């Protein structure tokens, strides 16, 4: 089962985190496109349809990732979305996608805390891509 | 035993009595709290009734349905925010659209609870609210006692400190795993970025120290006659290496007598912040004009740059703690987001004012006015 052709879009406003995620995901054997803001990611989604997307939560706004996920799902309803953030540890604001209520308004398939290990990320991506 | 007053706002009597039953004999306790909480329920069938209750008796927690016959939950929430009631609001709603959720969260709703909910869900929710409320009040109490604990400030601060640590840690791991091969030069970019992030962190810590000086209030200010032209020159010298790199010319204009009774260290912080911003947010080949305009009762300082400027919307936010304007033009510029908030606080200690005038892509002017003491 080859996943060489799968394209993953990563959006994050921290250039270093973006670079590191790009390297990590490429290393796992995927193609990667990157965006440094919600606006840039939105524009890219008009022209490309990634197989999966990973969005940072706090970009231009503190809820950019949610809004981006919402808009992305309207364009590509079947594209799995991961929200990656350090928000919980920092703000004490907890949510996950395992309860029905959060899943209804957060249009993402998975919520991950930042700092995830490469093998964990690989497993989660494969699960969402049904590989 | 402490009692929390819980206001239940729902137009369905069944829900209200259900909540009453579930919370009536429920108590919450934590190891870190001196005493347990129990709950006293107050019911309201409409948003209008809820507001009457809020205005007439103490309420700690509001369980708020969004769909109400008259005014809806969001409107009640807006009223609570506007009146600055010290309550924690939990929205109960059978559905939460993204818009509603964002709007409610921005208006201070603490959380959402889906409807229908089980007794267990309600208890868990109330437990969280009680904990949140306790911590919030504890923080407030400590502030009132002069302990200067600012919970929100600290949580943002931890984000600002953690981001560079994460970035540097990430790069070190990539190097440790030799992800880009064995040649050290292939890691140059990562090393550069790590150093940049560490430098940013160092600047943040320096800024925090400045801020602590203001906020501790204990620092004795050493007031003496300060020649602001000398202070300005010192700040210009500090920025010179960076200004040369970017071919930005800095000029100083002094009108009249530049002496002011002030603390020289504080004046230095103010000038350093303004001049370094004027260079950082400039364009290559641009200029910075520093003018000490002596104006009778007030001493006016103007720092004008020919830089990237900003929108009116952005210029209204820049004096707040940790606010940085994020766009493609500021992407490469590092900063703690504290410089201008520090400057403003310092200026205010002298009963002075600071304002900003800016035109996108043309430049920005900061105008300080300091009264002569």
Image: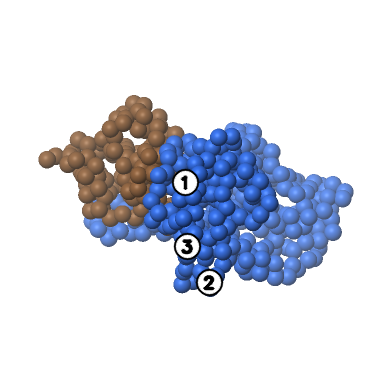
Chain colours: A brown, B blue
The residue identified by callout 1 is B15
Q: Which residue is at the far left?
A: A1
- Residue B144 has which mark? none
- The subunit letter for the residue under badge 1 reads B
Q: Position of residue A38 (x, y in %)?
A: 43, 37
The quadrant where residue B172 appears: bottom left
Task: Name the secondary structure under disc 1.
Answer: helix
First of labels 2, 1 by sequence position: 1
Q: Could you tell me which secondary element the residue under label 2 belongs to?
A: loop
Residue B340 lies left or right of residue B162; in this view the side is right
Q: Which residue is mark 3?
A: B25
Quick one: quadrant of the C terminus of chain A? top left
Q: Crowding at label 1, few (<14), some or many (≥20) Cα neighbours within 10 Å? A: some
Q: Nearer the viewer, residue B140 or B20?
A: B20
Q: Nearer the viewer, mark 2 or mark 3?
A: 3
Q: How many marks?
A: 3
Looking at the image, the residue that sits furthest to the right is B296
* Mark closer to the chain start, 3 or 1: 1
Q: Pick whichever of labels 2 and 3 is earlier in the sequence.
A: 3
- The residue under the point 36% across, 53% down is A113
Which residue does the numbered mark 2 point to in the structure image?
B35
In which quarter of the view is residue B265 placed? bottom right
At horizontal 54% and vertical 49% (from top left) the residue drawn is B8
Instruction: Compute the Cα span from label 2 to label 1.
Output: 29 Å
Q: Which residue shows up at 36% across the image and 29% down it?
A: A74
Q: Is residue B147 above or below residue B81?
A: below
């Amino acid at each position: 089962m080859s996943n060489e052709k799968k394209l993953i879009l990563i959006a994050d406003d921290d250039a270093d985190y973006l670079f590191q995620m790009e390297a990590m995901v490429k290393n796992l054997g995927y193609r990667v496109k990157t965006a440094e803001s919600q606006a840039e990611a939105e524009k890219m989604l008009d022209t490309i349809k990634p197989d999966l997307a990973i969005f940072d939560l706090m970009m231009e706004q503190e809820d950019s990732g949610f809004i981006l996920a919402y808009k992305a799902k309207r364009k590509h309803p079947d594209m799995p979305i991961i929200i990656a953030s350090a928000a919980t540890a920092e703000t004490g604001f907890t949510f996950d996608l395992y309860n029905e209520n959060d899943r209804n308004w957060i249009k993402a398939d998975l919520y991950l805390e930042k700092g995830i290990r490469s093998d964990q990320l690989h497993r989660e991506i494969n699960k969402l891509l049904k590989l | 035993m402490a009692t929390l007053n819980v206001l239940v706002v729902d137009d369905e009597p069944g829900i209200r009595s259900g909540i009453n039953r579930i919370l009536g004999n429920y108590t919450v306790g934590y190891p870190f709290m001196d005493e347990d909480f129990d709950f006293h329920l107050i019911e309201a069938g409409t948003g209008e009734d809820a507001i009457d209750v809020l205005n007439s008796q103490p309420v700690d927690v509001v369980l708020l349905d969004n769909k109400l016959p008259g005014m809806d939950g969001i409107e009640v929430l807006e009223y609570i925010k506007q009146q600055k009631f010290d309550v924690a609001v939990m929205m109960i709603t059978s559905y939460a659209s993204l818009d509603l959720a964002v709007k409610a969260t921005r208006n201070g709703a603490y959380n959402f609870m889906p409807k229908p909910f089980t007794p267990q869900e309600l208890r868990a929710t109330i437990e969280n609210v009680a904990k949140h409320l306790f911590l919030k009040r504890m923080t407030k109490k400590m502030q009132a006692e002069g302990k200067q604990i600012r919970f929100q400030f600290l949580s943002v601060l931890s984000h600002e400190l953690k981001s560079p640590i994460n970035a540097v840690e990430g790069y070190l791991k990539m190097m440790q795993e030799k992800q880009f091969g064995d040649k050290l030069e292939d890691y140059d970019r990562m090393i550069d970025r790590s150093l940049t992030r560490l430098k940013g962190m160092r600047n943040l810590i320096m800024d925090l120290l400045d801020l602590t000086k203001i906020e501790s209030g204990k620092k004795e200010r050493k007031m003496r006659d300060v020649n602001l032209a000398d202070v300005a020159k010192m700040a210009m010298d500090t920025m010179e290496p960076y200004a040369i790199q970017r071919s930005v010319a800095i000029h100083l204009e002094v009108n009249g007598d530049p002496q002011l009774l002030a603390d020289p260290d504080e004046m230095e912080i103010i000038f350093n912040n303004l001049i370094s911003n004027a260079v950082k947010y400039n364009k290559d080949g641009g200029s910075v004009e520093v003018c000490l305009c002596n104006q009778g009762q007030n001493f006016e300082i103007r720092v004008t740059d020919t830089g990237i400027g900003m929108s009116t919307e952005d210029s209204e936010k820049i004096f707040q703690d940790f606010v940085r304007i994020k766009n493609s033009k500021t992407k490469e510029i590092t900063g703690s987001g504290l410089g201008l908030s520090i400057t403003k606080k310092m200026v205010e200690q002298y009963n002075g004012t600071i304002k900003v005038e800016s035109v996108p892509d043309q430049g920005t002017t900061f105008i300080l006015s300091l009264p002569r003491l």
